Amino acid sequence: MLSIFDIKRVKDEFGQKLLNIPGVTGLAIAAKVTDNKKLNELAIIVYVEKKRKPGDIPGNQLIPKQINGVNTDVIERPILRGVHQSGSGSQPDTLQYPKLCGGINIGGGPVAGPRELGTLSTIAYDRSDPPIFKAIVSRHVAAPRVAWNPGDPLFRPGDSYNIVAQLEAVALYTRDTVLPIDAALAHIIDQNNILCQIAELGEVRGIIKNDQLLKMFDDANTTGNTIHVKKRGITSGVTTGTIVAVDSGYEIGYPNDIGHVQFPDSMIEINADSEFFSLAGDSGASILIESNNVEESNRIIGLIVGGIRDDPRITMACHIEPICQTFGVSICET
């Protein structure tokens, strides 16, 4: 049986040809489904706007059943049009927590407004001696417009907006970086005012790297298991779900002048255990592994980018490893 890395190589090589076929809306790697039954076999998932009978499809538009030994699976699904999970239209948690940690409220934008409100991802530290603590936040929360300046304030909402951090760097795919991420880094003003944990979820135990997560997804599928994850956001609180696809594409419409961003097929797709996994205000929330395996549990795999407009059960996330590499930081863990 081919490994997920073999499948990814084929997908990377032939992906653009598949995307050029009229009606194809996206690609991913996920379990193949036959007769509504999930198989213990990974395939290149080809999403199409509408499935058609083979006889109705021109020969040059037929999606091959197999590419270089890798099976494909055609699934009807429109383009994943996302909604950013930040803002103040819902009823987010605006409590004043005594210390900064992941999972609590934070906002960015001009002092005079308008501001975006989201979830503080996690605490990190740089490579200086002694290390300096930083806050990782969603880019579209910390800097909700294309233009930004070093030193722009990040706020903690409450009776008044208190400045707790100052923006240092941002990274949003196609706007600031070629990497498929949505994140920002901020200097924490009070270096003693931090906890290396996620509110309600406990201590952070590090990260799961990209290739490590792919291997876990491959192993889980082979054994008929699933990867369980959890997060704490300021609107929906603690929710759980499972990873249903990796290397998935995603188009999201951001507020203000950032506009639409089409993330390449490199996102993590999570399906909620209940009605939803994330809501507006949860942008930036860290997604952690939930497992009895202490080597994996409470490790961060990625950050929430947004939800799916037509399916609130689905949440899309970007990987944490390239965020740490881009900003030159490590995740604060106990």
Image (tube, rainbow, N blue to C red):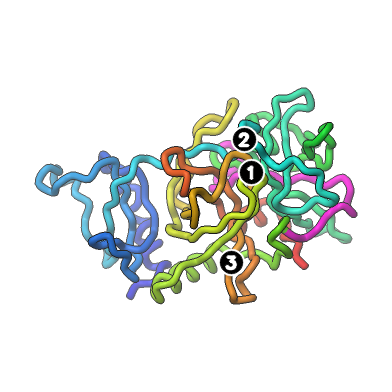
Q: Nearer the viewer, residue 67 or 331?
A: 331
**Neighbour tally class for label 2: few under 14, some 14-19, many 20 plus, Cα within 10 Å:** few
Where is mark 3, residue-wise?
A: 290
Q: In the image, is 49 to the left or to the right of 139?
A: left
Q: Amino acid at mark 3?
A: Glu
Q: CA distance from mark 1 to mark 2?
A: 7 Å
Does residue 283 appear in the picture of this structure?
Answer: yes
Residue at 54% from the left image edge and 39% from the top image edge: 174
Image position, residue 1 (x, y; %): 33, 75
Identified by mark 1, the residue type is Thr
Which dot, 3 or 1, sits closer to the camera? 1
The x, y position of residue 156, in whole percent, is 79, 39
- Badges 3 and 2: C-beta atoms under 8 Å apart? no
- Labelled pair 1, 2 in contact (Cβ < 8 Å): yes
Residue 277 sits above or below residue 301 on the image: above
Q: Quadrant of residue 93?
A: top right
Decide: marks 3, 1 in contact (CB < 8 A)?
A: no
Residue behind mark 2: 90
> Residue 254: x, y in percent?
55, 33
Q: Is residue 130 left or right of residue 334?
A: right
Q: Residue lying farthest top?
A: 112
Residue wearing tag 1: 235
From which residue to which does the magenta span run? 175-197
- Identify whether 117 is placed above or below 326: above
Ranked by sequence position, the earlier of labels 3 and 1 is: 1
Callout 1: helix, strand or loop? Answer: loop
Q: CA distance from mark 3 to mark 2?
A: 27 Å
SS of the residue at dot 3?
loop
- Left or right relative to 127: residue 21: left
Check residue 149 for magenta coloring: no
Residue 17 visible in the shown view: no
What whole-number distance in Å separates the C-alpha atoms at marks 3 and 1? 20 Å
